[in-house]
Every structure is written in structure tokens, then in C-alpha cells.
Image (cartoon, coloured by chain):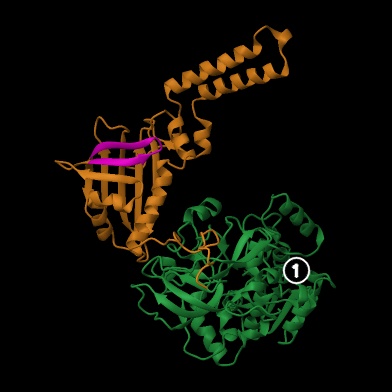
Chain colours: A orange, B green
Amino acid sequence: MTKQETRGAVFQPTEKWLLVALGTGLAALGVRGGPGKLGLGRLALAGTGITLAGVALRGTNPLGTALKIRENAQGETLVSDAVTVGQSPEVLYAVWRKLENLPALMSHLQEVKMLEEGRSRWTVKGPLGDVSWDAELTADEPGRRLAWQSLPGADIWNSGEVLFRPAPGERGTEVVVRLTYKAPGGTAGPIIARMLGQEPSQQLRDDLMRFKREQELGFHPTTQGQSSGRSAMPASGGNK
Amino acid sequence: MKAVIWQSTNHVSVEQVPDPELLLPTDAIVRVSSTAICGSDLHLLDGRIPSMEKGDILGHEFMGEVVEVGKDVKTLKVGDRVVVPFNIACGVCDPCKRGFYSACDNSNPNHRMAEALYGAVSGGGLFGYSHMYGGYAGGQAQFVRVPFADVGPFKLSSALPDEQVLFLTDIFPTGYQAAENCQIVKGRDVVAVFGAGPVGQFAARSAQMLGAARVIIVDRVPERLKMAAAAGIETISYEDVDVLVALREATGGRGPDHVIDAVGMEAHGHGPGALLDSAEQKLKMTFDRITALRWAILSCAKGGTVSMPGVYGGLVDKLPLGAAFAKGLIFRMGQTHTHRYLGPLLSRIEAGEIDPSFVITHRATLDEAPALYKTFRDKHDSCIKVVLNPWGQATTA
């Protein structure tokens, strides 16, 4: 996968015509009964309807644009992020290449099960429950790049690649991840997921930071379980 | 144990809370022998720093004795006497390796919160300073958990009393870094410091140590100006004069070669800008009141440095960037890379170049902390710096 032209989230045909129908309906409700009955409320209703239909006809979901959700010419949502890790490309590639290890690094990934012939079954936590698919590697360049793609029959069609580029100045490796997925629910899917904090771009950021810390520290910093004024105190009032 | 707890804006209290425990094998537990209230804690009291939660243990200036170490701690042992930098650093990421400890990539478990507010990067964790900065429990307590125990805590071998070394945790290095950031040309450069609070006092004395030809400090509180004057620092009270005119006159019309803003986001000050900031802050239209920063930019000589140890929290309004651009100013700012300075500044203390305890005006027990937060904020009772003994029995402040 190389860099490609991107655009805002374009309504899928069903979404588009549903919105146009809804907008026209509202507008019709607003102007029903002729100009004589046109009060402020009805005017607002008609205005909303016309705006809705207009937005739908223009084609790009403005919420998606506001949330910076991008997609490619095929209407697949694009997600990418990068992190610099203080390790060599070879070491990081090797960690990544053992696909079955990835769930330990990435909190949103439930399981990767190796199947025959370079195929694997992936399970992730989605906003509406677990989603799984079978995938195959489409590129494997040791120390440089891995790419994969879901196989027919996947719940969510997706593909991705991870690049390992030496960072200038002996700073380790720039790990770049690019994903594409065909969201369920048209343009609304990624928008709702984003609002729930479950959109892949947010998960990816978390996971890349986890990956970096796992490689650089070998553990994750935490305050879980620390003392605070919120902790329940024994009746004796503590030991001091 | 006892600890100072943030309850809500304008409300801190001392509570009994569970003793801290090791959470990771690289942690240590320190029994706190002395701790201090920092000027930046007052921003928390005032509710100016987002992401504080009821129940948070405050405090980031503390020292004491190591009483427990995790199994992966290599350099620290039980019984070691340590000062602990206020910022938490992992020691292995790229910023840490380059000495930018406060910009640590890895020590803030809540990096996402800071990224949401400040963009795609987050600084490292801090003790007792909001969840955005990691949510780590602070050291205004009898015990404290210290993560990355091999990286932060600095072992003391000398017998210097707590009061002389406690401020290595924050305000002395913070003032020193502010002066160092000015790249002072010895015997030539004039340095002005806005704000004669504890950091301003250390910044001014550090500028002297680094060879400034003259150091001028600006404040309005007489006892703060007096403290600086005692060290041969020139003083200007901005209540009495037009500070920009006074600085021009003091420097033959050039302006100070470098200006240190040791005030930060809650400047008082006069003029329409100050009134506007105050109104906007109340209406939540701006985070920060920036009179000191405006004065710093407007007074600074051409090609000079505006060095900003004072804390800023968010967005600012009416920043005279045109003046800064016209004069070709250099801006240096940020949290202190405390870890860098512990050894060198301890040497200066041992050599008698400075005795940091000069800044202490109040000594008290932990129980008296809530009252002293307000005394310090309101600059009552000539308060400049408060040191707390977590084990002391309550007497009078």
C-alpha cells in the first residue's frame, strides 16, 4: 500500500438518499398548508429539512470532516499513526512478525490465532462487541515492512501495513502503521465509534504508545492502586 | 499516614489515607522528612490546572529516607537519604537520554489527557500535579511512592540539613535553569526577573552566580523585594512606578538583555491588559493572566531572551508577538529538567556559594498546611516559602 489520495467521509448511496428523503420530508411538513400557515416553528422545520437534504446531496459528511475522518477513493476509512521507538528496526520487526504476540502489546486486540498457509484469525474489541476476521500477509520484508489484508467473509473488510524506518540520529525506529477499513454503518460508523473513543485511530495511538513503552521500559507506568484521599480507610485511621 | 489532600478549588485538607505501596518493581517508598508548598501548588488551590480530582495527594517538593525498594531497583538502598525531583522521568527514552527529563516520553500513564489538551505530545509525569500530568500521588505526606527509583532520587552523602537541600527538588533548579536559559554573557548582560517569589529569588541569585553584570527584580511585595535586596539585587516595585519606564531608565534605554518571567499564569499587575485577562479568566475565555509575560516581552532588549520558568496552563490572549518579532527575541520555557542540576547545584551549596534556606519564612507541621496554603497565596504574614515537617506535632506556625 502506498500513499494515496484521500478525501472526507463521503456518504454511501443508501445514507445519502435516506437523508435526502428525510430532509425533503421535513421541508414538506414545514411548508404544508401554504404560505398562510408559515409560522416560525414551521419555517425552522423547513429550513432544517432543506439544509439536511442539501448536505446529503453535497455528498460529504460534515461531522466526519469536523472529526478529521479520512477515506480513500474506494470509501474505505483510513487510519494512520506513528511512534519512534528506541530499538532497531530488526528487533521491532521480529516482535511484530510473531503475530500471535500482538495482543500482549495491543490492549484492543483480543487474540491472533495462526491458521494454515500464512493465514491468521484476528479478534478485536469493537464498540458493539467483538469483531473477528481471517487475514493473510500480503508483504513480509524483514526489518522493513509487513502488510496484511482481510480475506473474503470478514465482519469488517480491512487491510494494513506497518513500516519500520530507521530514525535519523540513532534514535531507534520510526514505526508507521497505516490501516484501512470498510466501516459498517456508512459514514456514521466511524463517527459514532470516534465519539465512543473506540475508533481505530484512537485505539492505534494507545496501542503504539503501549508498544513503545513495552519495548523501551519493559513495563507500563501506572498509578493503579496508589494511595489517595479516595481510598477507603480502616476505622482505626491507618497505621500512623 | 497523614497527607495533604486536594478536595476542590480553594479547599485542601489533611487526611488519614492508606500508606503507599510499591506498585512496580522499579518503585521505592520514601519516608518524607521535609516537604514544601510550591508557588505552583497555588495554581492547584486556585483551580487553574485542569484534571485535578477530589482526593489527590498534593506536593512535589519533598525529601526523605528510602524505606522500601522494589526488586528491580539497583542503585537505591533502604536507608539512603534522598532528594526527589518533582518530575518523573524514565531515563531511557530519547528526551531523557538528551537530558530533557521533563519531556520524558514514558512516565505519564495519562499521556492521552495531555495530548487532548496540548496536541500530539505530552510531557512526563509530575508528583501531585493533576491527572493530565500522570495523576501520581504527591509528597506532602508522611510517605510517598517514587516510581523510576533509579532515575529520579538523588542520594545525599553530605550531612547538610534538610533545609539546605530540600529546594534541589524544584525551585532552586527551576530558578537556575531560567537563568541558564538566558545564556548570560559574564560581566556584560543585565538580567531582569519578574516576580520575587521563591523561583524569582533563585533565578535572580542564579543570574548573579552565572556572572550577570546586574540583576534587577520586579515585584510589589515589600518583604520579597527586601529579601532580594539583601543579596545585592536591584529592586523595582511596580506599584510605585511604570515598570517599563523604570527598566528603560535602569538600562540606559536598552532594556534588560534577558528577562525572566517567574510569575506565570496568575499575574496581578496593572493596566487594561491585566483587567481584560482577569475578566476573561473569570468567564473562562482565557486560561492565563499574562501581565508579567507582556512586560517581559515589552521590556526586553533587542536580541534578548525571554525565559519563562513560570507555569502556563493553556491559551493566552493579547500576546505582544509583534514586539517580540521586531526585537528578535529568543523564548525559552518549560518544566525544569531537574535531574540535570541536582549534582552541580549540590556542589554549589557544599561550596558555600548559596544557602537555599534563605527563602524560608514559615516552618510548620503537615496539619498546618491547609491554613498555610492560603497564607502563602494571599502573601499574608510576609509568607514567601513554607516548609512542612510531616512528623512534627502541631504547634503554632
Could you tell whether B313 is left or right of B144 in the image?
A: right
Asked where in the image residue B58 lies, by quadrant, the reply is bottom right
Q: Give above or below for A52 relative to B236.
A: above
Q: Nearer the viewer, residue B296 or A100?
A: A100
Label 1, secondary structure: give it: loop
Q: Amino acid at mark 1?
A: Asp
Q: Which residue is mark 1?
A: B378
Relative image position of residue B139 (x, y in whole percent)? 54, 71
- Residue drawn at the location 56% of the way across and 14% of the way down: A25
- Residue drawn at the location 79% of the way across and 73% of the way down: B220
Q: Nearer the viewer, residue A210 or B158?
A: B158
Q: Residue reaching furthest bottom? A: B351
> Does the magenta run of residues contain B202?
no
Whether residue B279 is visible, yes or no, is yes
Q: Nearer the viewer, residue B299 or A151?
A: A151
Q: Give above or below for A4 relative to B289.
A: above
Q: Which region is colored magenta?
A: A121-135
- Image quadrant in which the N terminus of chain A is located: top left
Helix, strand or loop for the magenta stretch, by majority:
strand
Pointer 1 local density, CA inside 10 Å: few below 14, some 14–19, many at least 20: few
Disc tally is 1
> Does the magenta run of residues contain A133?
yes
Q: Chain of mark 1?
A: B
Asked where in the image residue B5 lies, by quadrant, the reply is bottom right
Whether residue A172 is visible, yes or no, is no
Q: Residue reaching furthest left? A: A117
Relative image position of residue B47 (x, y in whole percent)? 65, 58
Q: Residue reaching furthest front? A: A235
